Image (cartoon, rainbow, N blue to C red):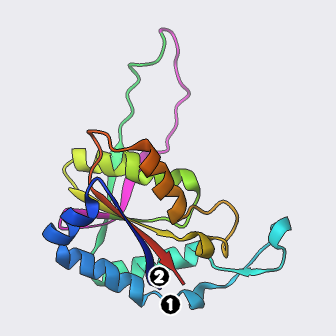
Amino acid sequence: MIIAGIYSFNNGEGIITSRYPVELEEVEQVIAAVDSTQYKTKISREKTMLGRTLYSPRALNRAFTREFRSRGWKSHRVECNYSDRYYVSGFVPKSSSKVAFREMDFVKNRVGVEVQFGKYAFMVYNVCAKMTIFKKLGVIDVGIEIVPIKSFAEQMSTGVSYFEQIVWDLEHRGVANIDIPVLILGVAE
């Protein structure tokens, strides 16, 4: 795969290139090592693309995971202990045995990387919430978000997020005082 688009949010590019050049080089190596043509294996069952062979986001994610792990990047998971102090008086929730957590796809030397070939809301959540949370928890200082460009996403199932969407949103949203530096990389096949 190739890097087809670069967007620097909150000076992400400047900080990452100056303070984390080794990690950035590894991210670039990972992207170059993933041969997307191997993952155009999903036969669509959607009305608008019935029978069409598409890229499989799950298979692409697995390929990225193999490449990142082979370079010593690890996922980082934190358990969420939800408080009940905000329930209204007298409300007792039904018990759930499911443990909730938040997870950063890949972390190395305080750089957090998220690979997003999923729905749009997850892309925005990664940059505007999750990375900030992991910074506050002392896990990362900067983030890199890897997303497909629009022409690549159009060869996946409907609803897959893409580079041009997040760039537009972040440019129109602006930077808040809690945002961390993030480099958005738009990838293509």
The residue at 25%/57% (across/down) is: 11
102 part of magenta stretch:
yes
- The percent position of residue 12, horizontal first and vertical second, equals 27, 60
The region drawn magenta spans: 89-112
Dot 2 and dot 1 residues touching (CB under 8 Å) = yes
The residue at 29%/70% (across/down) is: 74
The three-letter amino acid code for the residue at tag 2 is: Ala
Viewer-side label of 2, 1: 1
In the image as oriented, which residue stretches furthest toward the left? 19
Which disc, if any, is residue 63?
Answer: 2
Between the residue at mark 2 and the residue at mark 1, the CA separation in whole angstroms equals 9 Å
Which disc, if any, is residue 102?
Answer: none
The three-letter amino acid code for the residue at tag 1 is: Asp
The residue at 54%/57% (across/down) is: 165
Image height check: is 99 above or below 119? above
- The percent position of residue 41, horizontal first and vertical second, equals 67, 84
Circle 1 residue: 35
Label 1, residues with CA under 10 Å away: few <14, some 14-19, many ≥20: some
